[in-house]
Amino acid sequence: MADKKRNTILFVLLGLGLVFMFFSSISLGSVNIPFKEVYSSLTGSHASKSSWEYIIINYRLPKAITAVLVGVGLSISGLLMQTLFRNPLAGPYVLGLSSGASLGVAFVILGAGLLPSFLQTIALSSYGIVLASTLGSTLVLLLVLVVSQRLRDTMAILIVGLMFGSFTTAIVSVLTYFSTAEQLQKFTFWSMGSLGNLSWSTIGILAISVLIGLLLSAGSIKPLNALLLGENYAKSMGLNFKKARLIIIFATSILAGSITAFAGPIAFVGLAVPHIAKLTFQTSNHTVLFWSTLFFGAIIMLFCDIVSEMPGFEVTLPINAITSIIGAPVVIWLLVRKRNFK
């Protein structure tokens, strides 16, 4: 009963924290907009300045929504992978999806010179890069799914995913070696990740993909709890392990693949947030962990977005660097303080 009350208080605090961070992400930046003006703009009233209204609706709000979707998706997929492989170092990209997406983008950006000029323009557009990233991660997903049907050992699938990642990374390295400085710069900027520059239509596609992944993940809560005690125990409880594993891998692939396609490969969040949730709530029950990880993922991603914008300055730092710089010390502090690494 005490744990239930404690969890309720924590979830209320997380809910309030999410609302505060969401408004702060829209309010703070190179141009600081008062909370009152943000609230007026979001509730249908108009901000007192038309320039503020334009910034909120066309730039800040889409970016804040993208941050929530990215944080939620990567955090939940990290939780799924850590439980499936029973490995605290597993993350959303452990199956090689990020490397597959990077390979697709590398072919487009670094190999664009081999295409006719009219195709270069299409391939190097934002839609072309998203399509290339999607195709790359989908190809790796299909290969992993085929392998997962043939292998009984879950750890073998982890190794296969890492091998796919190494293979695609090697090909990217070869393409990089023969690329120009301009091509390398563009590819490097993509690999740093970005929460901005997404239109409302692309945010809609990303939101649908993340929602599908979350629904599959929520449906896997019981199997995930059973897997905590090992595969043999889960099978003895009547769990169709092969089917459950396939759904978990598919959910992770949808979440991590779609996010990488639209926002680039964003590090750390998927690896660290599940541990922050576990250490805060002191539980391994996935009914609690699912929602706590979801809240923490959104809050941390919004906070990283605020820091990357450097409030009061016109410079925007790479989101990929911020997630690791901020997150790593937090996790180390939590681990040292709790001395409990589940």
Image: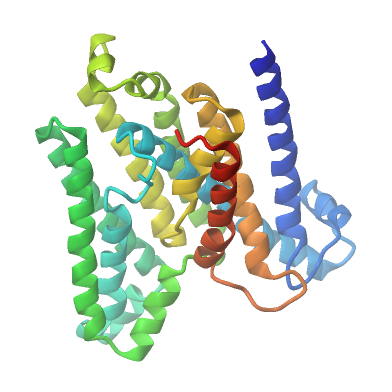
* Residue at 26%, 86% in the rendered image: 179
Q: Nearer the viewer, residue 102 or 342?
A: 342
- Residue occupying the far left of the picture: 150
Q: Nearer the viewer, residue 110 or 98?
A: 98
Viewer can see residue 184: yes
- Against 260, is 212 above or below? above
Residue 30 picture location, percent across and down: 74, 73
146 left or right of 96?
Answer: left
In depth, the one of 101 and 241 nearer the eye is: 241
Counting from the top left corner in percent of width and height, residue 111 is at 24, 79
Q: Is residue 145 visible?
A: no
* Placement of the N terminus among the 4 image quadrants: top right
Q: Residue furthest bottom?
A: 181
Relative to 134, residue 85 above or below:
above
How many numbered marks does the figure carry?
0
Residue at (61% x, 34% y) in the render: 280
Position of 319 with respect to 31 (left or right) is: left
Q: Position of residue 269 (x, y in %)?
A: 49, 51
Judging from the image, the colouring scheme is rainbow
Q: Quadrant of residue 248?
A: top left
**Eyeballing the image, is 159 above or below 2?**
below
Residue in view at x 30 percent, y 37 percent = 250
Residue 220 figure quarter: top left
Which residue is rendered at x = 26% and y = 29% of the image? 245
Above or below, 154 relative to 331: above
x and y percent of residue 45 in the render?
85, 51
Give whichever of 109, 292 is nearer the camera: 292
- Which corner quadrant of the image does residue 187 belong to? bottom left
Horizontally, residue 30 falls left or right of residue 177, namely: right
- The C terminus appears in which quarter of the rendering? top left
